Image (spheres, coloured by chain):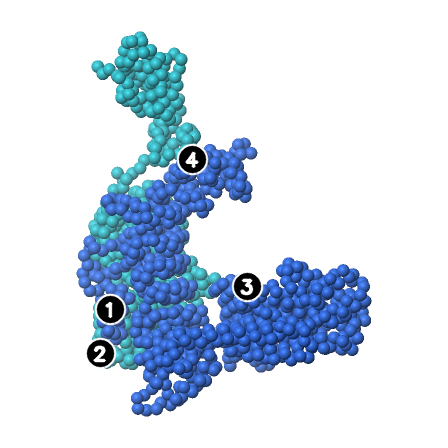
Amino acid sequence: MAEITITPLGAGQDVGRSCILVTIGGKNIMLDCGMHMGFNDDRRFPDFTFITREGRLTEHLDCIIISHFHLDHCGALPYMSEMVGYDGPIYMTHPTKAICPILLEDFRKITVDRKGETNFFTSEMIKSCMKKVKAVNLHEVIQVDDELEIKAYYAGHVLGAAMFHVRVGQQSLVYTGDYNMTPDRHLGAAWIDKCRPDLLITESTYATTIRESKRCRERDFLKKVHDCVEKGGKVLIPVFALGRAQELCILLESYWERMNLNIPIYFSLGLTEKANHYYKLFISWTSQKIKNTFVQRNMFEFKHIKPFDRAYIENPGPMVVFATPGMLHAGLSLQVFKKWAPHEQNMVIMPGYCVAGTVGHKILNGVKRLEMENKQHIDVKLSVQYMSFSAHADAKGIMQLISWCEPKNVMLVHGEAAKMDFLKNKIQTEFGIDCYKPANGETVTIETQHNIPVDISLSLLKREASFTGLKTPDPKKQRVLHGALVMRGNKLQLIDPDQALRDLGIKEHNLRFTSTLYVDEDGASEKLAEKIYMLAKEKIPDQPSQYSSDGSVSVSDVMITVSGEDDDTKSVLVTWSHQDEDLGSELMDIMKNELPVIVD
Amino acid sequence: MFNTSESQKAKSQLISSLSVIGQSAASLKELHKQLVDTAIQNLTSDSHHIRSSCLSLIGHLESHDLPKGDNKDDDVTDVQKLLEKFFQDQDSRVRSSAFEALLTFHERGVKLDESLYKAAWEALNDDYEGVRLAAIQVVWVLSHLYPESVVPVPNSDEELRLVDDGFVKICNMINDISVKVRTKAASLLGSLHLVSTRFLEQTLDKKLMSNMRRKKTASERAKDNYSSGVWSTGQKWADDAPKEELDPESINLMNIGACGAFVHGLEDEFSEVRNCTLDSICELASQNPGFALLCQDSIADMFNDEIESVRLNAINSLKKLSQHLELREDQLDIMLGVLQDFSYVSRESLRDMLCEMKFATKECLNTCVVALLDNLRRYPEDRLNIWKCMKFLGKNCANLALPLMPEFLCLHPYFDTPEPEMDDPAYISILVLVFNAAAGNRTALPMFQEHTWRHFTYLRDSIPELVPDLKTDDSKEVLVENMAQVEKSHEAATFIKCTVEKLSDLRSLDTITAKQLLETAVRDLQRVIELDMNTSASAECICLFLQSQLLITQLMSQHAYILTGSVTVSNLNVLVDKVLNLTNRLQTLFLGLGNNDLSLIKQTELKALTFRLGSTLANSQELATQMKAQDVYTNYLCGLQKFLTYTDSHTDSCTSYLISELVNLKSNQLSNVQNVLHSALKLVRPVTCMLMNKVRKAYAVIHEPAKVSDNPIKFTAGLTAAVLLIADIENVSRIENVRVQVKYPDTTVALTIPSSHDVRKRSALGHRLTTHVLLSHGHWSESCTVEIGVVILSSSAAKTKFKTKSASSSEEDSNVIELCKPVKVLISPKPHKR
């Protein structure tokens, strides 16, 4: 039995630091190489010593696959490739390859320049790491080496996110990364074909959630923004640079277009601007609407959204501002928030989750008076709204993906253990397949069925087809193909028996069965023979029966000879070759049942 | 050829061509039989091309009514059995052809066998989308054919009706992996009207949960708020926090069967699927009021879709379901958002929807009115449509409007409120609503203040179609009012009839009396046109005809001079052209004219032409001109003669004389012609026409651009600017004759043909034109107006054209007839900057 072994180094019963080691058909593959946002020490990176105590990883890994550009999926990449050491290929999609270094650089800046950490990867390292990356297109089959091939599928979630189908020989697995089964304003839904892998490794962030339609949330969001600016208020939307920010921009932009509003929308400069540039380039990765509109114009060429300048904070009149970072813990968004908080016609919309301790978390919990670092106080009078725009598949979506690709086993990662249990049960009952949820460092072995491929000679197949092809096909009837199984080298072949005999120089042995029945019936033996002939014709109409003059009956290759005197018991001699065993025994049964056979 | 050919492709092509041959020779049963037999023989071929083309040939040609005696039914099922065997062929293309062949059977009226059902639904799990696509249709066809027969549920003893089972199976396909299959499934569901309510209601089922706890959908929350009577004061953080714990066993994660099928379809990635799902929901809901109530929220949710066509579809769907529904406030909130939409079409369809809706409470009506007023403020050009909407709101919700009256009219128990400005469109909207509501509920009348009554009288006169009559006796019912309306039309109709009858002996009167009579009749009719909507088209038609007769009498009075040549040609030609113009309009604009009417009109035309020819022959010195004029005339006469004999309608003495004489004449005998004309002109008499049919007049209403805006459209001279034109065109049977006309101040005229996809059919004779008009001109020193109008090419003008050298330039111009008053648009082409 062949097997696939999987060891999550991160994201096993956990969210963050996605890194899964897979051994499939003798190939070692690393799926994602992420970092953990929650830690600032060594725990933020996966434990690469699991692979080898010392030395480089190159000889232990055949390839690395990165599903998308979020740092919890690619954050440890430069560390691994440059500081630990890996020179093999790294596969990711084109948009991921474009955006990933921006985020890594930003991440490096924050940790090294702001927090003053040393022993961290440098810009140089990011660059040399990106040189090892090979970009893939959707649905393009990449041959990593002779046996290992990978194929990317669209995953939604963020621009360039992909699911990967990995195949070695007959064994295959699908790694989903993060994906989204419901489309949003700028990205489509994940899609995969019925590839029937041995294993599906899926994320399960929302394992116990079924969500409402996107439209409902969007409507809420738009209505709130519109009402606020209508009354002359200012709206602050703290966002992270990539992903949701673009979705909300498209949402507001098209709403502004639809309602013909001319209140300014600003987008903070820097990272986001760079990212928007890439969104403009990778239109083919976006949703139906954006693709269709592209014929006329690029939706990411915003008409209403302009770059923000710090001086605009003091501007009178309504406006909408997107500012980074998303949790209001530092930077421009906090600065804007401080200015706008004391006015109650203003509004802040938090589009995502906020870590405890940040200003964002505090105001979401209804804190009305904030204390800032230099003993200043801010009265929070503006209205605070929470909107969840998250692009992960919910429980229904996960189940749908499973039913689409029909895997033989499922493994849940990237989610909380307790929630996984529920989904695991559901998968086992609904699909009747095995489901695993390994913790970090825990190894799971999955046995796969190993089929042995056999070459069949074309002439044999054609001859067989021409036999049966004369009749109308009847799917309910199985067909039998006679051939000889020959092992040549390490390959199996199914060939014509005659050919096999000739090749091996062996003479053919014929095996014939003979059986005699004694029938107690009066009359001439010819009469009985005729009776048997009629019987055979009636019971087995699809075989050619013949009644020859010398008193013998042949049904296909089965010979029946009747002998005996007129008034005596007749002996019926039936002979058939072993190829006709079925027919022969059937005939015997018929005769035994229908004729007055003497049983000794 | 067939037996010799080796190539499989060639063979399959041959079979396809044989199939086409068979189809074109529809009656040759023997040939069909022969072909089908050949096809059946070739079914065993090992090429999928050949197999699938054979199957499709069988589908097209196998006929069930061969003279085969009593085993006809067996024969049909035999072939179907044969096809069924191919459902499991090893090649997907052959499998799908087998299903398609069955569908062709069905289209040709052969009844499919029920036994196929099992094989068909098993094929729904096929790996190939083509097979699933065809199989899903077969399931659908069978569900239609045998709705009530019973099928067993696998793994249990239960049994289901076939239509239910089919419905569930098709619902399942909404989760399919392929967009095409999803679209097909979504659109097929709509027509399964016989499905049980139990399954129908499941389709909208979706339970939300968060971390294993039950969560309410937004619409449920809104409903709760509404029923408890408490309004949440703005959403708080975690307002939608999940409540109760859920039992893991009870949660259904898979969209199995009908469960949540429509919800899923509405959330699909592709707008095609969403649109089809909406259509299906709408169709099913119109059959089933209970389901209509359930799906209300889902449809309302679609008002916020990102693609406009889906939004429009949602609005229209809800409008179609209006008789089953009652809108709640929270739903209304969502819907009224559309009124702020920039797209005119969206706003208009939403208002149309509001016209037919029922509201649950008076607050609904109030928010609705407020939203409409807001709409009016944002987009003043929607004025007329908003008033119309207000009228229906008042009519439909008279009882809800009553308690709101004081608010609407700004009444105060103690103080007199200032009199509102009469020209304010917002105030007019309110008044339209109030008056219409008051017509239905007379208790409101005492609330009116003195100035309200004054405004009523004014509005009643200025926009009678929107304001009902309130002055009638209080005891009279609303019904009577409607009756009065009908009665009035009737009166008008009889009046028209009388007027026309008075003129019946017109031909026997002398010219002067006839002229006087005609003048009075025309005057009377013109007033009728203004007064009554129903009969105005007929009245206008007769009026135009009589005007042409009046002109004929003028010509008659001059005819004595014509032949002597003392009347100037131009003077006469002006009159003739006027007549021709009138007849032209009669023939183009009015729909439903009888043959008799048409022949009268054409004869009038002939008379005018006769006058023209007479004068041309008398006055022109050039032989060429004379010949040419005569040619045109004879041509026309021949055409007319054909028409008259074809329709077998009455001809008057003048025409019959002309026809009998002139047809025989050769064109070179000009003097003879002149003689004939001379005597013919003496026979000319004005006639009257009795309209038998109710005629309709073609017209257009331009919604956009609405009126002269003070801001000119600026563009660089020589380049173009696009102006959105939205117009409703009514009663035009040949829409391809409609043109958009742009008149520039320098009298240049541009005619453009609107492209066919800009025209949308709204009713049998109504069309909506939505197009961009391109304007372009050289540099102007200041802004000036151009006129944009919708015109129609006249159907008959070309034939009567007699080209004189001078008239050729403005030819195109006179060939068109305006359908409405052109709209003026201010533009200012700027010199381009360097």
Q: Name the residue under label 3.
A: B733
Instruction: Please tell me whether residue B361 is drawn above or below residue B422 in the rendered image.
Output: above
- Say which amino acid is labelled 3: Ser
Q: Residue at x 64, y 73 (%)?
A: B505
Label of residue B224 in the image: 1
Q: Is mark 3 on a helix, strand or loop?
A: loop
Marks 1 and 4: same chain? yes
How many C-alpha atoms fall within 10 Å of the one at disc 3: few (<14), some, or many (≥20)? few
Q: What element carries label 2?
A: strand
Alpha-carbon span between mark 1 and mark 3: 52 Å
Chain ID, mark 3: B
Marks 4 and 3: same chain? yes
Chain ID, mark 2: A
Q: What element carries label 1?
A: helix
How many C-alpha atoms fall within 10 Å of the one at disc 1: few (<14), some, or many (≥20)? some
Question: Where does residue B528 sit, x and y in percent of width and height?
Answer: 54, 77
Q: Residue at x 46, y 73 (%)?
A: B486
Q: Mark 2 points at which residue?
A: A369
Alpha-carbon span between mark 4 and mark 2: 93 Å
Q: Name the residue under label 4.
A: B70
- Quadrant where the C terminus of chain A sits is top left
Asked whether A286 or A51 is in front, the reply is: A286
Q: Which residue is drawn at 40% across and 88% down?
A: B451
